[in-house]
Image (cartoon, grey):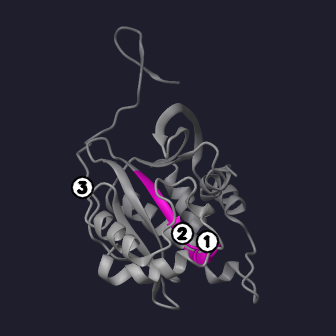
Amino acid sequence: MPRINKYGQPIGDEVSNWTTRSEPENVTLVGRTCQVEPLDDVKHTEDLFDAYLQAPDGSDWTYLFEERFDELEPFRKYIKTIAREKDPKFYAVIDLTTHKAVGMYSLMRIDPKNGVIEVGFITFSPLLKQTVQSTEAQYLLMAYCFDELGYRRYEWKCDSFHAKSRKAAIRLGFKYEGVFRNAIVTKGRNRDTAWFSIIDGEWPNIKSAFEAWLSPNNFDNQGKQLKNLAELRESCGTGES
């Protein structure tokens, strides 16, 4: 039941001792299989260019704001530009086996006053997608925002037609919140935007599920998972698939 004020109106829960949060910094987040570090055009451009060209076509970029770059120099210019931005703030994902950048993503729409932040511009190459590193990279950035920066809400948004992104959000523990119709115009077409979020009260159980999933004990000798994230969230008490 909601709280009731002196006028008999329902109001939200009290947020005690709230203070403005810090903005994301140039941190390096080290996991068991991957490392997340600030995007650097000198260090990461060629690795990322080669990684993205592992895809047979540009379909991974359909729902992004850019098309896939097929030439190195325009891509280098693009990385140089976005690496200097503060919002969105881009990070590269480094495979700790090869020590090469295999994808990038960002923290964006950063709202320290209200403790709201979004993960976006997720551009994972075929060398990263559907790997343990991919899941760990998402976990590392979430943990940074909730545990170190103290944000209250972590958002995921995508084109409503982007079925793979919607599926990934649900797999990672985000809750679907609905669609903003006619949200933006991109590449000369309309985009309805699907919204997902994780909030701070949900994070402890989601975090426990991530850590259980990422444990080497959750994989057999062939590297196949024994329990998926949905099963582990259920056992940790979230009850979400």
Q: Which amino acid does label 1 sit on?
A: Lys
Secondary structure state at the residue bearing disc 2: strand
User: In the rendered view, does 206 fall on the left or right side of 75?
Assistant: right
Q: Position of residue 141 (x, y in %)?
A: 43, 65
Q: Where is residue 61 in the image (x, y as percent from the top left)?
A: 55, 60
Secondary structure state at the residue bearing disc 1: loop
* Distance (Cα) linking label 3 and label 2: 27 Å
Q: Mark 3 points at which residue?
A: 22
- Residue 124 is covered by the magenta coloring: yes
Q: Name the residue under label 2.
A: 124
What residue is at 34 percent from the left and 76 percent from the top? Answer: 28
Report the magenta residues as a range. Answer: 118-133
Secondary structure state at the residue bearing disc 3: loop
What residue is at 30 percent from the left and 70 percent from the top? Answer: 80
Q: Is residue 158 above or below residue 224?
A: above
| Nearest-to-viewer mark from 1 and 3 | 1
